[in-house]
Image (cartoon, helix red, strand yellow):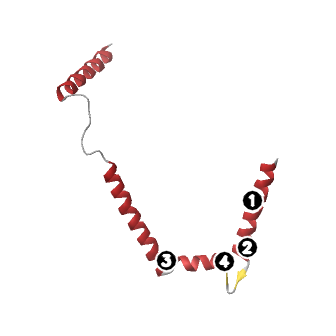
Amino acid sequence: MFRLLKLAVGLTCLGALVYFAYTVPLGEKTLWEHIQAIAQTDETQQLVDGVKKTADKNLRAQAKASRPTEQHSDFTPAERAALRRLIRDKIASTAND
């Protein structure tokens, strides 16, 4: 019951905030119009572009660092070839059945 009441209060507050943002004028514009005007400035666009470039560079560096540099295996190349032959023969035998 308490969770339902908490949800109702939260949704009511969210609805009030949305109503306020879209309808109540703060000077010449509403809150939503102020936010849109700020988001469309050159400085904001430069900030967004800088964040994207930095995030892309960091993600690429992290991906490069997480790639294995060498293959770790307990099998020798001859053993791998033998396993491939066994698998190929098993697939061929089950396909013929």
Q: CA distance from mark 1 to mark 3?
A: 31 Å
Q: Which residue is mark 4?
A: 31
Mark 4 or 1 closer to N-term?
1
Look at mark 2 in the image and give the residue it sits on: 20
Which class describes the residues within 10 Å of circle 3: few (<14), some (14-19), or many (20+)? few
Q: Mark 2 packing: few (<14 Cα in 10 Å), some, or many (20+)? A: some
Q: Are marks 3 and 4 in contact (CB under 8 Å)?
A: no
| Disc 2 to disc 4: CB gap under 8 Å | yes
Residue type indicated by callout 1: Gly
Q: Earlier in the sequence, mark 2 or mark 4?
A: 2
The quadrant where residue 29 appears: bottom right
Q: Which numbered disc covers residue 44?
A: 3
Mark nearest the camera among 4 and 1 is 1
Label 3's element? helix
Who's the residue at 41% across and 63% down the image? 55
Q: Is 75 rendered above or below residue 56?
A: above
Q: Residue at x 24, y 42 (%)?
A: 70
Above-or-below relation of 82 to 51 = above
Task: State the residue in front, 52 or 87.
Answer: 52
Q: From what the image shows, is residue 63 above or below residue 51? A: above
Q: Amino acid at mark 2?
A: Phe
Could you tell me which secondary element the residue under label 2 belongs to?
A: helix
Q: Residue furthest bottom?
A: 28
Report which residue position mark 1 lands on. 10
